[in-house]
Amino acid sequence: MALIKFLFEIEKKPRKGLLAVEWVIMGYLLLTLLLTFFMTTKIQNPEPMFWLRFNAAMLTLALWVVYRLIPCRFTILCRISLQLILLSWWYPDTYEFNKLFTNQDPLFAGYDQSMWGFQPALLFSQVCSNPIFSELMHLGYASYYPLIAVVCVFYFFKRYAEFELTTFVILASFFIYYVIFIFLPVTGPQFYYLAAGLDNIAAGVFPDVGNYFQTHQEALTVPGWKDGLFYYLVELAHAAGERPTAAFPSSHVGVTTILMFLAWRTHNRKLFWGMMPFFVLMCLATVYIQAHYAIDVLGGWVSAIVIYVFLHFLGRKICPIGK
């Protein structure tokens, strides 16, 4: 009964407008809608992209109407959960834009070579091929969305006064990364190594692949122990939604770093230290499975600090619940 009351108790002062994160969504919709209009002649099939934006806007407004009819914590949760679910739509959508810009993988692969003298993404899984180590790496990578869910659920039930602020920081960070990915086309090792040729990569040669990724989405086989459960889950996720996009900075590392900041703010050490092993595994796994260059991980850490500080400051100003 206490849970039902917590979820469905009618708010005394329901919000009239959109949530802060919904305004972020609308801003991203408008930006990418304008890009779609300007690039219509270059995009192969723009109609689904227009419909995606229309449907996302209509779903957002529909849940706003539901909330206005039943203004309670549960309908707030539904509004925010919708935007979290729609992230799986927006990620592959970045590919439709960034494939039209000049690919920058030779530059970033070259940075890794200059920093380390070799390609960490090429050698990591070869040097550490133990099945147990492989499964730990894939466990770390597969923990990405569960970690997001853990932080959101914790704030919803334990620190509800900051739930809207927290989810604003998480979701807005995603869209900041998506804007970067649109205009900075780096596909990552799993796509670029195949396009450039592994012999070239091993020799430290990083050729320009031109417009290759406008028509090709093939990737290297995910490295690791192929009979592992977590290997299977990562491979399944890649087959379902991976595209040659979104390598620098690593949003997996960036968002997970932001989650760690949010976990630390709860002052709940069990939550923070319980997440720490998965965070470490995540940072290693992005290079191990060849999703990212090592410099992408560094970029993820640095960008996470900047984005978190900016969004947390902004969120304190615009999120009523967070005040």
Image (spheres, rainbow, N blue to C red):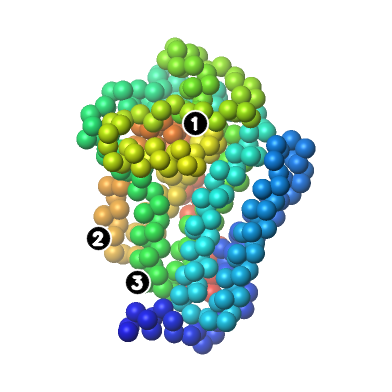
- Quadrant (top left/top right/bottom left/bottom right) for the N terminus: bottom left
Quarter occupied by residue 123 = top left
So how many labels did they put on this image? 3
Q: Disc 1 on helix, strand or loop?
A: loop
Could you tell me which residue is drawn at 28 percent across and 23 percent down?
A: 127
Q: Is residue 77 visible to us here? A: yes
In the rendered view, would you say 151 is above or below 18?
above
Q: What residue type is labelled 1?
A: Gly
What residue is pinned by disc 2?
270
Q: Nearer the viewer, residue 51 or 260?
A: 51
Could you tell me which residue is drawn at 60 percent across and 44 percent down?
A: 93
Q: What residue type is labelled 3?
A: Lys
Q: Disc 3 on helix, strand or loop?
A: helix
Distance between mark 3 and mark 1 Cα atoms: 38 Å
User: Left or right: where does residue 111 sit relative to residue 256?
Assistant: right
Q: Which of 30 and 4 is in front in this view?
A: 4
> Which mark is drawn over residue 188?
1
Could you tell me which residue is drawn at 31 percent across and 23 percent down?
A: 126
Q: Which amino acid does label 2 sit on?
A: Lys
Neighbourhood count class around disc 2 (C-alpha, 10 Å): few under 14, some 14–19, many 20 upward? few
In the rendered view, would you say 7 is above or below 152?
below
Residue furthest toward the bottom? 12
Distance between mark 2 and mark 3 Cα atoms: 13 Å
User: Left or right: where does residue 210 sit relative to residue 143?
Assistant: right
Q: Disc 2 on helix, strand or loop?
A: helix
Residue 98 image position (x, y, % from top left): 63, 37
